[in-house]
Image (spheres, helix red, strand yellow):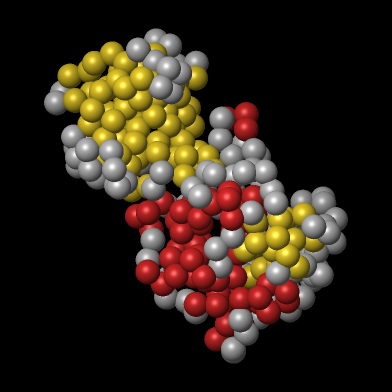
Amino acid sequence: MSQIFASPCYAIKIGLQTETDSAGIGTSVKGIIIDANTNHSICDLEAMKGYEIKPYHNLMAIQYKGKFYKVNSDNIVIKPVGTGFVSAKGRWYRGIIMIQNKNGKLTVINNVPLEDYIKGVVPSEMPSSWATEAHKAQAIAARSYALANLGKRARYGYDLKDTPEDQAYRGASAETSDTNYAVDQTKGIVLTYNMKVISAYYSASAGGMTNTNSWGSNLPYLRSVPSFDGNIKKNGHGVGMSQHGANNLAKQGYNAYQILQYFYKDVKFARVDPKSYN
């Protein structure tokens, strides 16, 4: 397997909320709010307590025990002290939460190590009860898509959305031992074509045959093949890997690498620079 010495990708920024009027946050252990502009501590957070952040002019305010307190920053970070999780949108996440006041509206971002992000994607995109090799194929495809699309949503201040517009991502709340195993077993592995990580498009099912046309782009690694998704009607764009097809192939004895080489033409596997994952 070849190695790609990509630019360091210590974390990926995932947009959880954009232009919202409030954000509920918390930490599973004692937490802290930091002014991202100065790196100075603003206040401590009690474990397992809910707080609400709202825009206040060009700054922010935090509600605690029914009262709002002014936060003298337009850019804050919420992080646990020690090992723990952060909360937003009613879910737990690894990494940290960033909140920015942009023109009187809040943008909420999960800044998370890439492998931890993939752990939240796989069970959000594919049932955790499915075959292990399908989960591994999903992990490699999702990791490839993420790396190939870093900065896609830069105008909002993050890389990708947490919805199927990019990849469904429900954070640590979605994780299972089976899907985490698949991510760990494929750590750092990506799909490449001509030494570049590919946008490994996938959808739930292709309705019998996958599509080659990627929204006007003629990508050489995409081809139309039988999708092996049985009698399931097309669900999604049908480009690249059929997730139902991947699971059916896995149940027939195909491994993740065979599944991916079936759905994507002339691709090779590589492992990104491990220093990017420390």
Whether 61 is drawn above or below 44: the answer is above
Whether 250 is drawn above or below 187: the answer is below
Residue 205 in the image, given as x and y percentages of width and height: 62, 69
Residue 151 in the image, given as x and y percentages of width and height: 64, 38
Res 137 → quadrant: bottom right
Choose between 253 and 1: the one closer to the eye: 1
Res 197 → quadrant: bottom right
Q: Is residue 146 left or right of residue 224?
A: left
Pick out the residue farthest to the bottom: 252
Q: Is residue 160 left or right of residue 26?
A: right
Q: Residue at x 58, y 50 (%)?
A: 275
Residue 233 in the image, given as x and y percentages of width and height: 61, 72
Q: Which quadrant does the N terminus fall into?
A: bottom right
Do we see residue 68 in this rendering? Answer: yes
* Number of numbered discs on residues: 0
Q: Residue at x 39, y 48 (%)?
A: 94
Pick out the residue farthest to the top: 57
Q: Residue at x 24, y 16 (%)?
A: 69
Res 179 → quadrant: bottom left
Do we see residue 191 in this rendering? Answer: no
Residue 95 in the image, given as x and y percentages of width and height: 41, 44
Choose between 67 and 192: the one closer to the eye: 192
Pick out the residue farthest to the front: 275
